[in-house]
Amino acid sequence: MWKRKKRARSAEPLPLELCDLCARTFPADEAVREYVPDSSAVHPTRDWFDGLRPVTACCEAHLAAVRDRYRLRPFVQEELWAAKIDRALATGTHVLTMVQLGCRTGLHEPEIRRAIAWHNDHLPPDLEP
């Protein structure tokens, strides 16, 4: 009988990264990473990363271009607060009172009210109340 040669296969696929500027894929060990300020970014579990967006690039020049893009975007505190409220409402039990919402988000009532107003002002036209 004929015997086939077994091909050597790697145990795991090579992890790839995606450049946030050019969308090129490249090996993870070549990635250039940084956190940039972004009021729409909240971390799902670590609130000390709220307001910081992780970005990945294939080279320093592309990282600088991504950094400049976020530098031009205004940092809106109410947007960050609204994202924190959204995270609090999406996880755990439902929040019933303003005090409970404040405890979960670390926000005070005036900040919560400003965040809700900002959120309502930025609803898509088809979702407006």
Image (spheres, helix red, strand yellow):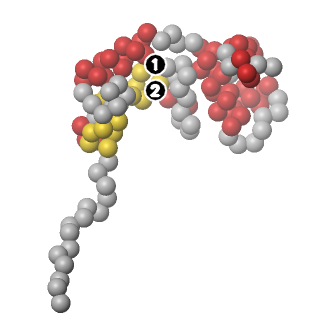
Give the CA separation, mark 2 to mark 1: 6 Å
Q: Check disc 1 and give the amino acid type.
A: Pro
**At numbered mark 1, what does the secondary structure look like: helix, strand or loop?**
strand
Percent position (x, y) of residue 60? 24, 23
Rendered residue at 30%/38% (across/down) = 25
- Residue that mark 2 sits on: 53
Q: Check disc 2 and give the amino acid type.
A: Arg
Relative to the observer, which residue lies in front, 30 or 35?
30
Q: Give whichever of discs 2 and 1 has the lower sequence position.
A: 1
Relative to the observer, which residue lies in front, 114 or 55?
55
Q: Would residue 6 be found to the left or right of residue 12 on screen?
A: left
Quarter of the C terminus within the rendering: top right
- Label 1 near label 2: C-beta < 8 Å? yes
Rendered residue at 49%/20% (across/down) = 38
Quadrant in the picture for residue 118: top right
Q: Would residue 54 be found to the left or right of residue 39 on screen?
A: left
Quadrant in the picture for residue 61: top left
Percent position (x, y) of residue 104? 69, 32
Q: Residue 125 carries which label?
A: none
**At numbered mark 2, what does the secondary structure look like: helix, strand or loop?**
strand
For residue 5, say whether it is visible. Answer: yes
Percent position (x, y) of residue 3? 17, 83
Quarter of the N terminus within the rendering: bottom left
Location of residue 113 with respect to 85 vertically, above or below:
above
Rendered residue at 32%/48% (across/down) = 15
- Residue that mark 1 sits on: 37
Relative to the observer, which residue lies in front, 108 or 41?
41
Location of residue 38 with respect to 14 vertically, above or below:
above
Extreme residue toward the front, this view: 1
Percent position (x, y) of residue 123? 69, 19
Rendered residue at 36%/20% (across/down) = 66
